[in-house]
Amino acid sequence: MSSQFLRVDRDGAVATVTIDRPERLNALDTGAVAELGRAFAELGRDDEIRAVVLTGAGEKAFVAGADISELAELDAPGAERYAAAGQGLMWSIENLGKPVVAAIGGYALGGGLELALACTVRWAAAEAKLGLPETNLGLIPGFGGTQRLPRLVGRGRALEMILGGKPIGADEALAWGLVTRVLPREELLDAVQAFAAKLAARSGMALRSALKAVGEGSNMTLDASMRLEAALFGVTCASADAAEGCQAFLEKRDAEFRHR
């Protein structure tokens, strides 16, 4: 796929999507959002790809936010359409059916943090700064930040970040559960790609089912989510991958999954 704002590199079953606007700190404008949407739609359809890494070019930023010059020109209907497009992108990443691991090498602010929140797992460089500074501009987050962040770190901490508008460092983000690993910047991308490769080697059916159980179950009552888990367990247990995985365990060998 030809792209103005992105690079998509494939290495076996892992794709690395790099937002490539370092001169703008990888800021998201409507063009970048549209390109990301097309890239993830293509990766979702590609059966050869079973895990995705998402990162930003350069040493300063993952994504430093939205393109403020573009926001300044929007009226209320235009801004609502812009937010809806961004929310659609985040939904497509969150519901890709494949794990998406964010490698946050620098600033993840505003739409950048919202992009990371839509990913399955977030690892950060020690220098990273994460925040939702929209209130400093008289705005609120519009790409899902007011909804995903409280679900991840709790209402109080989310409101502190949203209302206060002050970014937090990687170590605090780790303590809050906003990221799950903090690494030196020079090690981050290689470590994330190695982790994604380990995920991609697992049963694609099992990964899809686990993502569905957690993603859909979190919006259900406990009773309903347990029924969903049981149903998905039944489907995976009867799969060819489960048969292979169990047989490989009994034979003390590595499983050769066919992802069905």
Image (spheres, grey):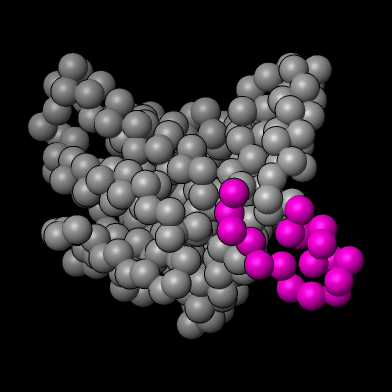
Q: Position of residue 239 (x, y in %)?
A: 69, 45
Magenta stretch: includes residue 249: yes
Residue extending furthest bottom?
186
Q: Nearer the viewer, residue 172 or 208?
A: 208
The answer to whether residue 132 is above or below residue 125 is above
Residue 168 at x, y = what percent? 54, 54
Q: Residue at x 20, y 18 (%)?
A: 76
Which residues, given as a range, are shown in magenta?
243-260
Relative to the observer, which residue lies in front, 20 or 11? 11
Q: Position of residue 126 (x, y in %)?
A: 56, 71
Task: Report the side of 144 relative to 216 (left or right).
Answer: left
Residue 74 part of the magenta-drawn span: no
Quadrant of the image containing the N terminus: bottom left
Label tally: 0
Q: Residue at x 39, y 65 (%)?
A: 16
Q: Quadrant of residue 15?
A: bottom left
Q: Position of residue 125 (x, y in %)?
A: 52, 70
**Residue 156 visible at all:** no
Does residue 183 appear anywhere in the picture? yes
What residue lies at 82% left-to-right and 62% top-to-bottom? 247
Say which quarter of the image contains residue 192.
bottom right
Looking at the image, which is closer to me, 15 or 85? 15
Find the residue positioned furthest to the right.
250
Left or right placement of residue 35 versus residue 84 in this view: left
Residue 206 vertical placement versus 88 (above, below): below
Q: Give the answer, above or below, for where 83 lies relative to 11.
A: above
